[in-house]
Amino acid sequence: MASPRQTLRTTGVAIRLLLISTLVLGVGYTAVILGVGQLAFPAAANGSTITQDGEVVGSALIGQSFTDADGEPLPEYVQSRPSAAGDGYDAGASSGSNLGPENADLIALIEERRANVAELEGVDPTTVPVGALTASASGLDPHISPEYALLQVPRVARERGLDEAEVRELVESMIQGRDLGYLGEPTVNVLRLNLALDERSR
């Protein structure tokens, strides 16, 4: 059985080790990683923010809605992918719908979205791409497929009084290829595209 003196000594060693570990791993390591991030990847380390006229308007990594106060699409903007995060693109409630592909509620929601997109774009419902109908797993996807972006070109051009060919060319110029050349699918960042459209409309 340990004596009180040995117990006190062991407790003192443990406390000193805890303090040293906290300083080295909790403070020192964090400071080093933060410094490396700021030096090597400053944009990513600061949230990949996007600015317009000197003000932060969003992040290249988090999607947002382009709708009015009633949740109706703003016709002059390219619309984002549906979101199941909170009331839509809520970074504090990131999640998918968690509904399986044969779930009746999900099927009904997809059909409703298909009809809404077809009406908004003035196209046949069968031409609406899948990316316009389903939410991503995080609910925060900032990208849409090139197909969905190009589907919206006639409406956006008409609402902004721009030449349709000009808007189509802008969309095509903003298509991002597959990561590393083979991972994922080509995408278009909706916020960046809408900001570019705002610049064209000035």
Image (cartoon, rainbow, N blue to C red):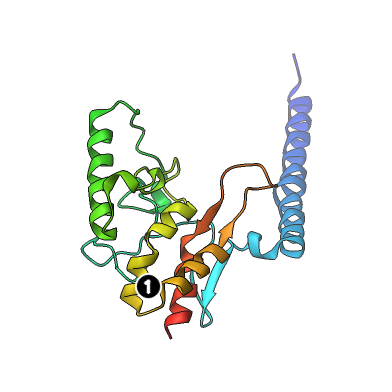
Q: Nearer the viewer, residue 153 or 10?
A: 153
Q: Which of 162 and 58 is in front in this view?
A: 162
- Classify 10 Å Cα crowding around label 1: few (below 14), some (14-19), many (20 and above): many
Residue under the point 39% across and 57% down: 151
Pinpoint residue 61: horizontal percent, then vertical percent. Answer: 53, 56
Q: Give above or below for 185 relative to 7.
A: below
Left or right relative to 179: residue 68: left
Which quarter shows the C terminus?
A: bottom left
Which quarter shows the N terminus?
A: top right
Residue under the point 78% across and 35% down: 13
Residue under the point 79% across and 25% down: 6
Q: Can residue 147 be seen in this view?
A: yes
Pinpoint residue 195: horizontal percent, then vertical percent. Answer: 47, 73
Pinpoint residue 177: horizontal percent, then vertical percent. Answer: 62, 53
Looking at the rendering, which quadrant does residue 21 occupy?
top right
Left or right relative to 81: residue 26: right
Amino acid at the residue labelled 1: Ala
Q: Which residue lies furthest to the bottom in this view?
A: 202
How many numbered marks appear? 1
Residue under the point 72% across and 63% down: 38
Q: Which of 93 and 80 is in front in this view?
A: 80
Q: Can residue 144 be seen in this view?
A: no
Looking at the rendering, which quadrant does residue 126 occupy?
top left
Q: Mark 1 points at which residue?
A: 157
Left or right relative to 187: residue 20: right
Pinpoint residue 24: horizontal percent, then vertical percent. Answer: 77, 48
Q: Give above or below for 152 relative to 23.
A: below
